[in-house]
Amino acid sequence: MADRILRGLIGGMLRLPYEKRVPAMGKAVSRGVAPIAGYLKRAKQNIAMIYPNMSDEERDRIARACCDNFGRTLIENYAWQEFGRRLATTRPIGAGLSALVQAKDEGRPVIFVTGHYGNHEAPRQVLTARGYEIGGLYRPMLNPYFNAHYEKTMTSWGGPVFAQGRRGTMGFARHLKRGGMGTLLFDVSASGIPISFLGQTAHTATSAADIALKLDALVIPYFGIRQSDGLSFSVEVEEPIALTDTETMMTDMTKRLEAQIARDPAQWFWVHRRWKKRNHRQRS
């Protein structure tokens, strides 16, 4: 039933012109889907945990804006061809661009790391349009019916995309070993190591650091930051993460994401169950 509702909503939205479709989907998710599905409540709870001194009004604003961004991101990525055309004039910026060019020239593997911030596919779209073939490792949706068409969308463009899991991770690593490039999102709860994220302990997967250390891959954080018009993006390619040790690298990646969230908390995906109850610790 949930899948049919989402399919109907997405299908209906795709019939609208792009400029109307994206904000309409944002409103549909923030005002309709999120309250019913519990996303809005979860976002408010997470925001309250991280910002205990924030006013209720501001928490509500951030939670609703987060759900609006969720809806916009969903429909943008389903219409990935139009999304790519919209980003055609977006020029990536940042200290990591020169290192990226050098890695491509040398055939060195590159792992882009990012979080569910703004639209995490915007950087891959922009760099793909500039000749970089970028694959990825994605987390399948829990709803198998929804995942069937979500997976098709994820794998329809760019480089090879693999589902998380032992088999997918091995395929992703083989792709990189041949000098490939790929994206990893590291900001979801997973078995891994405990790292402080926004002042609370969060278990964090170490795949990005482990694979990078094994393959001597360049690790570059990048972010697709939604602009004030709600439709355009700034794509920032940051200075590479130093290849040191797993915990240090994952901590450094986390700090890069924290810096983006500090700039605009509403663009991060607060609806995730990022902090499990067993991982919570009290602020000092």
Image (spheres, rainbow, N blue to C red):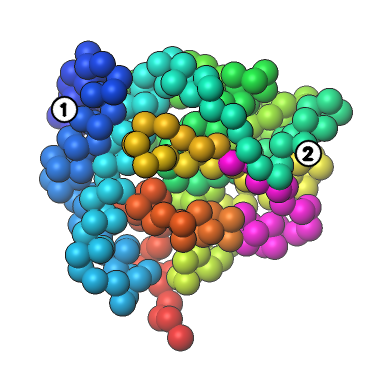
**Is disc 1 in contact with disc 2, using a CB cutoff of under 8 Å?**
no
Tell which residue pokes out farthest to the right in this image. 106
Whether residue 75 is visible to the viewer of this picture, yes or no, is: yes
Numbered range of the magenta stretch = 236-254
Count residues near mark 1 (Cα–Cα under 10 Å), then give few for <14, some for 14-19, many for 20+. few
Res 20 label: none
Closer to us: mark 1 or mark 2? 2
In the displayed structure, does residue 192 sit left or right of residue 278? right
- Residue closer to the observer: 101 or 159: 101
In the image, residue 170 lies at what x, y percent? 65, 33
Count residues near mark 2 (Cα–Cα under 10 Å), then give few for <14, some for 14-19, many for 20+. some
Mark 1 or 2, nearer chain start = 1
Q: Residue at x 72, y 37 (%)?
A: 97
Residue type, numbered disc 1 = Ile
Identify the residue under disc 2. Answer: 99
In the image, residue 80 lies at what x, y percent? 42, 20
Q: Which residue is drawn at 36% across and 22% down?
A: 78
In the image, residue 168 lies at what x, y percent? 57, 31
Residue type, numbered disc 2 = Ala
- Residue closer to the observer: 227 or 196: 227
Identify the residue under disc 1. Answer: 5
| Cα gap from disc 1 to disc 2, whole angstroms | 44 Å
Q: Which structural element holds mark 1?
A: helix
